[in-house]
Amino acid sequence: ILGPVFGSTQQAVAPYLKQQGIPWFSFLGAGSALATDGSAFIWPGADELTAAPLGEYAATDLGYTKIATLAPDYAYGQDVISGAVDAFEAGGGEVVQQQWVPLGTTDMLQYATNMDTSADALLMWLVPSDAAAFVREYRNLGIDVPLLMFQGVFDPTFQEIGSELVGEIGLNEYNPGLDNAANDAFLAAYAAAYDGIPNQTTAFAYTVLQAIIAGAEASGGDMSLEGLRQALA
């Protein structure tokens, strides 16, 4: 199975897929337990681990001592913030505020208004459209606390608000400007099939399908959980 994408949905179906011995592939992360105790193959990595470098960078490279956080209140948002916060605190930092956005919330003004401006930075992750709405409210209020954006805001949403993010720092696992043979091949394949600019979601899906095909070939067609684990290892 390819997917599901959202963390809460992954948690709902993972026990059944484990019970049935059905391998499933995530192409936008997942909680580490779904792979170690379940039947998942996670790309680009476990949620907690992919966000950790941003917390470490804030504490060690930027020298921040206090941060606030903002994320949606469900499995993925909680996992990535937890990973970043743990790394930030390990570097000697303190979290002074955490705001959790219920799924389905459209009014981002309240979260910008409630921001603790004593923080050195706001470490955040929201889905791109919500992130865009929040940044607009943030700018309209004139808040000057720097943003640390896990996954940033990728295209096509970035094209709408890119000028409002100049100077901010983000961590992203993919950028179409990467200069290597694998990305060149992906860009060519994408351009042949679609209009527009590829983003990390399309790059991850492309990469995961390559892994599935490689696993099937290396296992001689054995698509069982153990067959794929051995082949992909």
Image (tube, rainbow, N blue to C red):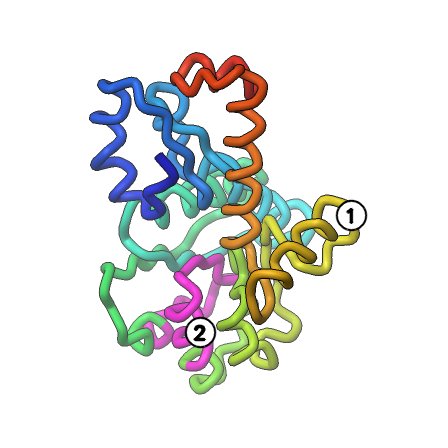
Give the answer, above or below, for where 170 lies relative to 92.
below
Q: Nearer the viewer, residue 133 or 90?
A: 133
Q: Is residue 52 left or right of residue 112?
A: right
The numbered disc on residue 180 is 1
Residue 92 screen position, x and y as percent? 56, 41
Q: Quadrant of residue 56?
A: top right
| Helix, strand or loop at mark 2 | helix
- Image quarter in which the N terminus is found: top left
- Amino acid carrying mark 2 in the image: Ala
Q: Quadrant of residue 91?
A: top right
Q: Which residues are magenta?
A: 112-136
Disc 2 packing (10 Å; few <14; some 14–19; many ≥20): many
Disc 1 packing (10 Å; few <14; some 14–19; many ≥20): few
The residue located at (28%, 49%) in the rendering is: 74
Q: Residue furthest bottom?
A: 140
For disc 2, the marked residue is: 132
| Helix, strand or loop at mark 1 | loop
Residue 49 makes an appearance in the image: no
- Amino acid carrying mark 1 in the image: Asn
Q: Nearer the viewer, residue 65 or 189?
A: 189
